[in-house]
Image: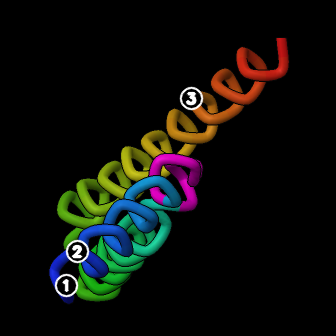
Amino acid sequence: MLFGRRSRTLNLKHKDMKNQSLLRRYRWPLFILLWGAGQFAATMFLYGRTKEAGVGFVIALGIICVAVVFEMIDETRERNESR
């Protein structure tokens, strides 16, 4: 009986996750990666290692691009559902 209730609860959570936007679903992992890339770039810049700081900056830009793509996918999905 307990297993049956648990599986229904997991199914409801799964349906809620499918309804959430990609950017909302992955905001914390993206934020953590962006924060880490910023910390890396700033630390390397402060120690005068500009090549490594540039690598950290490019990684941060890549993470921002992933967030923008997630937002574009979500907007396209909403636009297609409204038709």
Point out residue 26 in the picture as x, y percentages from the top left corner. Answer: 42, 61
Q: Nearer the viewer, residue 14 or 7?
A: 7
Q: CA distance from mark 3 to mark 1?
A: 40 Å
Q: Give the residue furthest to the right.
A: 83
Q: Left or right? Give the position of 8 relative to 1.
A: right
Q: Is disc 2 surrounded by few (<14), some (14 to 19) or many (20+) residues within 10 Å? A: few
- Examine the image and state in which quarter residue 77 appears: top right
Quadrant of image for the N terminus: bottom left
Contact? badges 2 and 1 (CB < 8 Å): yes
SS under mark 3: helix
Contact? badges 2 and 3 (CB < 8 Å): no
Q: Nearer the viewer, mark 3 or mark 1?
A: 1
Point out residue 48 in the picture as x, y percentages from the top left corner. Answer: 25, 78
SS under mark 1: loop
Q: Nearer the viewer, residue 32 or 53?
A: 32
Q: Is disc 1 surrounded by few (<14), some (14 to 19) or many (20+) residues within 10 Å? A: few
Whichever of labels 3 and 1 marks the residue nearer the N terminus, that label is: 1
Q: Which mark is residue 73?
A: 3
Q: CA distance from mark 2 to mark 3?
A: 35 Å
- At horizontal 37% and vertical 45% (from top left) the residue drawn is 62
What segment carries the magenta color? 17-24
Q: Is disc 3 surrounded by few (<14), some (14 to 19) or many (20+) residues within 10 Å? A: some
Point out residue 65 in the picture as x, y percentages from the top left corner. Answer: 48, 40
| Three-letter amino acid code at the position of disc 1 | Met
| Three-letter amino acid code at the position of disc 3 | Ile
Whichever of labels 2 and 3 marks the residue nearer the N terminus, that label is: 2
Q: Which mark is residue 1?
A: 1
Query: Vertically, is 1 above or below 23?
Result: below
Residue ID for mark 2: 4
- At horizontal 52% and vertical 33% (from top left) the residue drawn is 69
Quadrant of image for the C terminus: top right
